[in-house]
Amino acid sequence: MSNDGTGSYLSLNDISTPTTNNAEVNEIYQSFTSGSNGVDYTGITKNAIMGEEAFAFASVLKRSSAARLAIATIQMHIVILNNMYEAVSLCQTAMSSGTVDDGVGVYWDSAVAAAVGSTEGNEEGGSATNGYLFYELAQELCGYFDSCDSDGQSVLINNLMAEFAAGQSALQSSQCDVALNSRSTIERLLQAILIDSLAYHVKAASDGDEQHCLMAHVAASALVPLVRRDIEADASANTIEESVVATSSECNVNDIEAVYQALDFYVESQSIDCTMLSSPVCNGTSTTDDYVGYENPDEFTSNTDGNTLFNGEYQPMMDVTNIEGLSSILSAICSSNSTDAARDAYSNDATAGITIESMSLLAKYAMADELQLNQYIYALQDGVDITDGSLMFDNKPASEYANTITSDALDISPALGCQSMKVHNIWMWIVHKCKSNSM
């Protein structure tokens, strides 16, 4: 969870800590890290991974399962909210100023990605499962409660993705108020998934199943901070925590029906549509003929949807498929047998939506305000253009140094040009994207 000095990486805390100044998001985040009872619910994930506190007696496999659920429903939930709130906020700011902010699409797509994870099909080279985040969790839950639609899909997920698509459409047309409504609906749908998750695991733990009890502990930790934000539902939060008790030596679900009744109260308080839920919490009881459970909560549901998201109806505003095109161009250049062929691919192959040469030359505009680029320009400059006073490098504008170095390297050999592209062009562009789109 912390950097030990051997390398740089993003920790779970890094990705789930809001980086925006949105007061609402920060308030939600605070409810997880230091709520009214002073508990840091985000620490559940670390405890599961390290085998500490409530997970001290659990096996590695049980801890792994619990950690996966915690990451999906706590850390990634915060990521989703942070990105949705920022997308709508940028939309509102842009509309009031009459400008366009490309970050709107980046943030909204990032929220969708944090909810879906991966929808790779079972084709060669891809995963045979969906990424285990809210999307897959809801799909599994409808199977546990025998509440999937006629196509075997989660009704809740269908509505969630429809709302993501509606929000995207609204943002693209600067209808910020409509996007705000979608954001609010998505928040309630995510809470519905959390409710179903807790309802399932407390039900499954009824026969003393230790695995499900630990999972119920995680599910409760993912939901209780949100319940406590509703003043009228604070008693329900207390009931949940008193009914699902996990210590360093044992785990028990003391009162299943009390949990269901607390969840029923919260659903009504938040105006969550009962038809969206897979569980029968709106009945106020865990008794239902539809409950089928699942023998192995660690098993994924195979994804055979042909590698599409929401039947292809949700298309990211940012074209993430370009990465694959960029890879193919680089591969063609690096394996080329001639400098002419390598240079042609460098300058003219636009499979990725842009040539690598154009990507390099555009850097002087896209990265004009970035300190690192300007440091390189200053360090490499070996002359001054007397017509306008701009810095020069190798008789070309110093701001185009990446293209200059790569072009010279390609004149020597495709292999050297390959290395130059990786270091000066692609690496620089990726760093820029990470900086401008960081969460």
Image (spheres, rainbow, N blue to C red):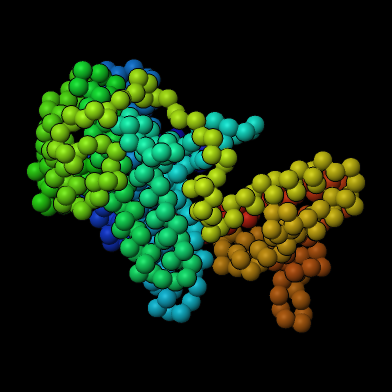
Rendered location of residue 320, percent (x, y) = 59, 51
Q: Tell which of 364 and 32 is nearer to you.
A: 32
| Residue 107 horizontal/vertical position (percent) | 45, 58
Which residue: 54% across, 39% down? 305
Q: Quadrant of the N terminus?
A: top left
Q: In this view, which residue lies farthest toward the front?
A: 150
Which residue does the image show at 53% across and 59% down from the upper left?
317
Direction from residue 162 to residue 27 in the image, left or right: left
Whether residue 121 is visible? yes
Q: Quadrant of residue 386?
A: bottom right
Q: Position of residue 303 (x, y in %)?
A: 51, 34
Whether residue 13 appears in this view of the structure is: no
On the image, the x and y values in percent for residue 371 come to 56, 62
Instruction: Tell me if residue 2 comes above or below residue 97 in the rendering.
Output: above
Q: How many marks?
A: 0
Quadrant assignment, res 180: bottom left
Horizontal side of 323 relative to 271 (left or right) equals right
Give the answer, above or below, for where 427 lies relative to 347. above
Q: Residue at x 29, y 35 (%)?
A: 197
